[in-house]
Amino acid sequence: MIGEAVNLPQKYLERFIERYNNSTRTSKQFTQKYRPILADSRASEGFNFFVKEMLYPIVAKRSLGSKIWDVDGNEYIDLIMGFGINLFGHNPPFIKEALQEQLELGIQIGPQIELVGEVAQLICEFTQMERVTFSNTGTEAVMTAVRVARAVTGRNKIVLFSGSYHGHFDGTLAKAQSVPIAPGVLPNFVADILVLDYGNPQSLEIIKAYQNELAAVLVEPVQTLRPNFQPKKFLLQLRQVTKESRIPLIFDEMVTGFRIHPGGAQAYFGIQADIATYGKIVGGGMPIGIIAGKAAYMDAIDGGMWHYGDESSPQTKKTFFAGTHCKHPLSIAASLAVLKHLKNEGPALQERLNQRTSQFVETLNIYFEQEGLPIRLANFGSVFGPASSGNDDSSDSAFSAIMDLLFYHLIHQGILLRGVGNFLSTAHTDEDCDRIIQAVKDSVEKMQQGGFLPKLSSKAF
């Protein structure tokens, strides 16, 4: 048994699992009932016999502001926040009104969407990019950005960095030595991917060595898995190297875009990429992906600028780009509401939220240190999670098992979260933060009493 292997108190564990199952029984029943027909990766993610009986998604019934209510009537303070979508909390009135207004007008797919020009203009204003196009998801946006870079440069190889996530497009699912990260991803799809060590100066030298073969360097400026690693110096050097080598630099701003700063990580670090991809927040909860960039690259989408009434015509060779639901009326209507709200609020919105998150994380870190616990959080703006050294901490089975148990204790206490990449929103109040902090303390105390965590008198783990 896993529990015996890591020397965990079985009786306490059994009692806690029973309580957890009782309070969320409908979610568990739902998962088991539909498992034969619903192939759901999230229902088995992180499978471990130690937590098997608690391994099921909480099934949500409704949401509002910072809260979610599940099918058993439990209330949770949500820290997952749609994996970073809900900067303004759940179901904010200004987005709800925009969606209702568009629903009254209809969902016209085929003709041009009336609002799309204004949305594109605002995105260019925020990001300082020259042109914009729309897709349905972040994965599609990254896929398109890479295709555009290859089309314009005529080169094949792409650089990614270790620890990054760029969606589930086969062409980015590579690890070191250009090896696919999962079955079903063909080796030839990742044969032109170089996976380099993020933040390592040696990676810059490798980029220089391959400069004549590289179509782009794709970077997640601050990785969700490593919020404590914010390599501004490396990013500045990367921009310089790619500029000198005429290699397009692509910023994946799915998480950082519009969150860390109105202009995203580019504005925060003072770096202008050639192409950037966005999604999540700007869609206001609706599916969206955005590819923005310099005209020299974005012209590959439509052939570039031309005018009516003269002899002008598209001059740039186009790559292929299409999608039935691209520029979906509901997504565009929600995006316009989001962008107008962000413009009206100004940078102070992000500044306040970033500061609140930093204070929240600091309070918890002080508590962990006082208790002698080997846990430390880090944040990049309003994104927070466990501080990472860049190594795979999951190799320590005892530590991993205990962190899993703490995770389930917090859910049982009414805090909905995941192991990495949690978010505060503008809907979270001081009372919410205080309640989360108290839930952490209560959970730690229970686990200490059950023999799962050391008490203050014992610093050893």
Image: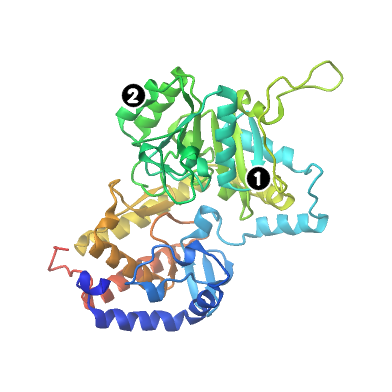
Q: Position of residue 220 (x, y in %)?
A: 45, 40
Q: Residue at x 70, y 24 (%)?
A: 304
For this view, does 279 lie left or right of residue 205? right
Badge 1 density bin: few <14, some 14–19, many ≥20, Cα 10 Å: some
The residue type indicated by label 2 comes to Glu
Residue toward you, 354 or 377: 377
Read off the residue under disc 1.
Answer: 340
For this view, does 233 lie left or right of residue 432? left
Q: Mark 2 or mark 1, which is nearer to you?
A: 2
Residue toward you, 324 or 408: 324
Residue toward you, 295 or 457: 295
Q: Secondary structure at mark 1?
A: helix
For this view, does 408 lie left or right of residue 272? left
Read off the residue under disc 2.
Answer: 205
Badge 2 density bin: few <14, some 14–19, many ≥20, Cα 10 Å: few
Residue toward you, 116 or 18: 18
Note whether 430 is above or below 277 in the view shown: below
Q: Residue at x 34, y 29 (%)?
A: 203
Please say whether residue 459 is visible from this viewpoint.
yes
